[in-house]
Image (tube, rainbow, N blue to C red):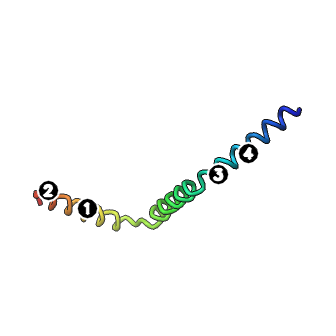
Amino acid sequence: MDDNRHKKHTRERTLFQFLQLNKWSILIASMAVASILIGLFRVSGDEVKILLKKAINICMECIGIG
């Protein structure tokens, strides 16, 4: 019984240490995921087509084909 309590305490301490050491990484990753989700919910069909067309035109001009 005491061994299970020790394992639980060690696991909680390890998780806390992980969060302490990586708080900026976790914050940046969560902000990135939030930005992606906001972008996905904002997308309309025409906006994606226009953006892709502009990107293709810029690439073609840069290469010298278009």
The span from disc 1 to disc 3 (Cα, nearest Å) is: 39 Å
Distance from the alpha carbon under mark 4 to that under mark 2: 55 Å
Q: CA distance from mark 3 to mark 4?
A: 10 Å
The residue beneath circle 4 is: 13
Is 24 left, or right, of 61 in this rendering?
right
Give the Cα distance between marks 1 and 2.
12 Å
Residue type, label 2: Ile
Q: CA distance from mark 2 to mark 3?
A: 46 Å
What's the amino acid at mark 3?
Leu
First along the sequence among labels 3 and 4 = 4
User: What is the secondary structure assignment of the residue under circle 4?
Assistant: helix
Q: Residue at x 25, y 61 (%)?
A: 55
Give the SS element for disc 3: helix
Residues packed near mark 3 inside 10 Å, few (<14), some (14 to 19) or many (20 plus)? few
The three-letter code of the residue at mark 4 reads Arg
Q: Residue at x 70, y 43 (%)?
A: 14
Out of 43 and 1, give the one closest to the viewer: 1
Amino acid type at image mark 1: Ala
Q: Compare marks 1 and 3 and give the one earlier in the sequence.
A: 3
Residue 55's label in the rendered image is 1
Task: Answer above or below: position of 17 versus 60.
Answer: above
Q: Earlier in the sequence, mark 1 or mark 2?
A: 1
The residue where tag 3 is placed is 19
Q: Secondary structure at mark 1?
A: helix
For the residue carrying disc 2, how many other residues have a C-alpha within 10 Å: few (<14), some (14-19), or many (20+)? few
Displayed quadrant of residue 27 = bottom right
User: Residue 16 placed where, x, y %?
Assistant: 70, 49
Q: Residue at x 89, y 32 (%)?
A: 1
Report the side of 24 relative to 6 (left or right): left
Instruction: Nearest to the eye among marks 1 and 2: give it.
Output: 2
Q: Which residue is mark 2?
A: 63
Image location (x, y in percent) of residue 18: 64, 47
